[in-house]
Amino acid sequence: MKKKILLVEDEKTLAKALKFNLEKEGFEVAVAYDGEEALRAFPREKPALIILDLMLPVIDGYEVCRRLRRNSEVPIIMLTARDEDIDKILGLELGADDYMTKPFNTRELLARIRAILRRTGRQTARGKKILQRGELRIDMIRHRVTVGERAVALTAREYALLCLLAANPGRVYSREQLLAELWGRTYDGDARTVDVHIRHLREKIEERPAEPDLILTVWGTGYKFKETDGAEDV
Ligand code: CA
């Protein structure tokens, strides 16, 4: 079955071109031209993913995202201008899954869409909703991470990285594997990007980030999540 994408974009020419390219790649596409229309279309269209422009008439993309997130975890890719606050977009306040800065490359957008759909598909297929690793708890339905009582704010990338590692404790991932899994195969990035995300993640979830207890370095190879006896997934 074709996956449906809800495209929210008020620039008609861009919307038309994107719709054409997405359909060519096998997606079904519904288009909304303003925020109000997007919120009306969402329950009707039940999309697998939303591409959401930030600057929209009637209700802007920030507000649309906020309202969608009240009762939906649908993956959202934001289309932004260069000077937007990315931390805010990907952070807990809005909770978009990824973003593209205009003007962007359609192939890169398609790679991001596929990576996100693969990720969410895998999580559903595995059927796990909560990963408990000692004090660390990952609620995969609500995209919430807590350490004990403390809520941890992660970016979308950090969250995806943590889910992948924690869902497969003991499995060693190379930097290249992690790049391919999380950034898509066409991403031509530096493997050190992975190290930076791992460092941020450790600072947020580890008790002593310099001597990590959960996300372990495998020298010369990459990273793995600590194997635990008491791992309980629900
Ligand atoms: Ca716009």
Image (tube, rainbow, N blue to C red):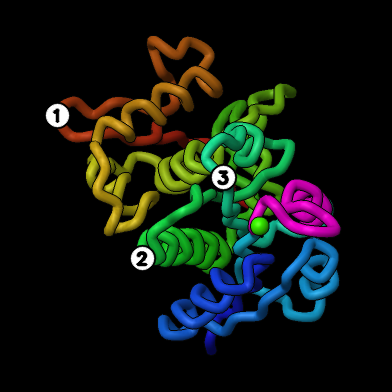
Q: Secondary structure beneath disc 3? A: loop
Badge nearest the viewer, 2 or 3: 3
Residue shown at the point (45%, 14%) measured from the top left = 209
Label 1 with label 3: CB-CB less than 8 Å: no
Give the class, few, some or many, for how many residues have Cα within 10 Å of label 1's Cα (few <14, many ≥20).
Answer: few
Q: Nearer the viewer, residue 87 or 155?
A: 87
Residue shown at the point (41%, 42%) measured from the top left = 165
Task: Give the residue pinned by disc 2.
Answer: 107
Badge nearest the viewer, 1 or 3: 3
Amino acid type at mark 3: Ala
Label 2 with label 3: CB-CB less than 8 Å: no
Check residue 65 for magenta coloring. yes
Where residue 151 sits in the image (x, y, percent)? 70, 27
Q: Residue furthest bottom?
A: 1
In the figure, is residue 215 to the left or right of 133?
Answer: left
Check residue 164 for magenta coloring. no
Give the class, few, some or many, for how many residues have Cα within 10 Å of label 3's Cα (few <14, many ≥20).
Answer: some
Calculate the distance from the C-alpha at mark 1 to the C-alpha at mark 3: 39 Å
Amino acid type at mark 1: Gly
Badge nearest the viewer, 2 or 1: 2
Instruction: Identify the disc placed on residue 81.
Output: 3
Looking at the picture, does residue 64 appear above or below residue 1?
A: above
> Mark 1 vs ligand 1: CB under 8 Å?
no
Calculate the distance from the C-alpha at mark 2 to the C-alpha at mark 3: 19 Å
Q: Nearer the viewer, residue 78 or 152?
A: 78
Calculate the distance from the C-alpha at mark 2 to the C-alpha at mark 1: 32 Å
Task: Give the residue pinned by disc 1.
Answer: 220
Residue shown at the point (42%, 66%) measured from the top left = 110
